[in-house]
Amino acid sequence: SSFTRRVLYAQMKYLVTSGCSFSKPGDFTNGTSQDPTTWPEHLALTLKTNQNVHLGVSSNGQELISRKLIQTINKLLKTTEPNDILVGIMWSTCDRRQFYIPNGYDKKHLLEPNPSPDNPHRWPEEDTQGKWHLQNVGFINKFADTYYRNIFDTTQSIVNSYEHVLRTQWFLKLHNIKYFMSTINEYSFEGDWENSAQIDYLKDMVDWNKFLPAQLPWIKQHTAQWSKDEYYHPNPPQHKEYVHKVILPYLYQSYGIKKCLKPSKK
């Protein structure tokens, strides 16, 4: 009913988002820009939530996308009711890895050059013992070259991705927290790769009803601008369209949450 929807909306206080560079907050979140850049900022502005925690990090993989979200929500639940929280996650690609490197590690030459502006990544901030080093198949350093040539396996990467999705969904369901998920593209989990024996039982347990269309394919089909650049990222108007035409309709249909209208000046 409309009354229920109004109550749900009135209780929405916290927005917590997680992802890679597609979900990384920009200058708007830092208060130095008038315009939002990525979908978490557009969504927060539209819903006008009281508190926003955006956890997106450039070059981030499924492991830290999940772990940062769970740690943040677990901490938030100590002072906040689950019904006050909305979670949004945009998963990255399965090839990305995060390695914990303790302080004093003397093999820095193996990790550089490293193109991610957020690398190495200290999280949680209270941790003074080391940092997370983000790696993906496109990085050109000795560490990445050794790992992806000799250790990386596609099947294991897909299995790990689904396990990160599942533990995140199970955690959110356990605490009755409203959430939605998406992916940056159609290759985030499998692409054309198949290994039914290892993958199908995990894939079948995923609640796909919580997933929205992958962002890049949707943008390619529904917006005027499209770049064929291999490292293409959506621009701010495209992020805004995705929020208003994909995320908001889902939130309204699933949870009765809708765009916050500006208060009357009267």
Image: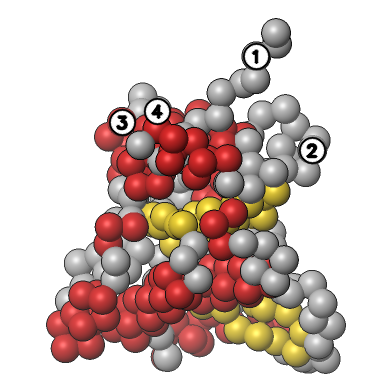
Neighbours of disc 3 within 10 Å: few (<14), some (14-19), many (20+):
some
* Amino acid type, callout 3: His
- Which badge, 1 or 3, is on the more N-terminal residue? 3
Snapshot colouring: secondary structure
* Amino acid type, callout 2: Gly
Q: Position of residue 137 (x, y in %)?
A: 46, 71
Marks 4 and 2, how far apart at CA: 28 Å
Q: Position of residue 212 (x, y in %)?
A: 33, 50
Marks 2 and 3, how far apart at CA: 30 Å
Compared across the picture, whether 125 is left or right of 43 comes to right
The residue mark sitting in front, 2 or 3, is: 2
Q: Foreground: 127 or 53?
A: 53
The residue mark sitting in front, 1 or 4, is: 1
* Amino acid type, callout 1: Ser
Residue at mark 2: 31
Q: Quadrant of the N terminus?
A: top left
The residue mark sitting in front, 1 or 3, is: 1
- Which badge, 2 or 1, is on the more N-terminal residue? 2
Residue under the image location 72 percent in, 66 percent down: 79
Res. 32 image quadrant: top right
Q: Is residue 80 visible?
A: yes
Compared across the picture, whether 157 is left or right of 123 comes to left
Marks 3 and 4, how far apart at CA: 9 Å
* Amino acid type, callout 4: Gln
- Which badge, 1 or 4, is on the more N-terminal residue? 4
Residue under the image location 77 percent in, 84 percent down: 130
Residue at mark 4: 225
Q: Foreground: 139 or 122?
A: 122
Neighbours of disc 2 within 10 Å: few (<14), some (14-19), many (20+):
few
Residue at mark 1: 264
The residue mark sitting in front, 4 or 2, is: 2
- Which badge, 2 or 3, is on the more N-terminal residue? 2
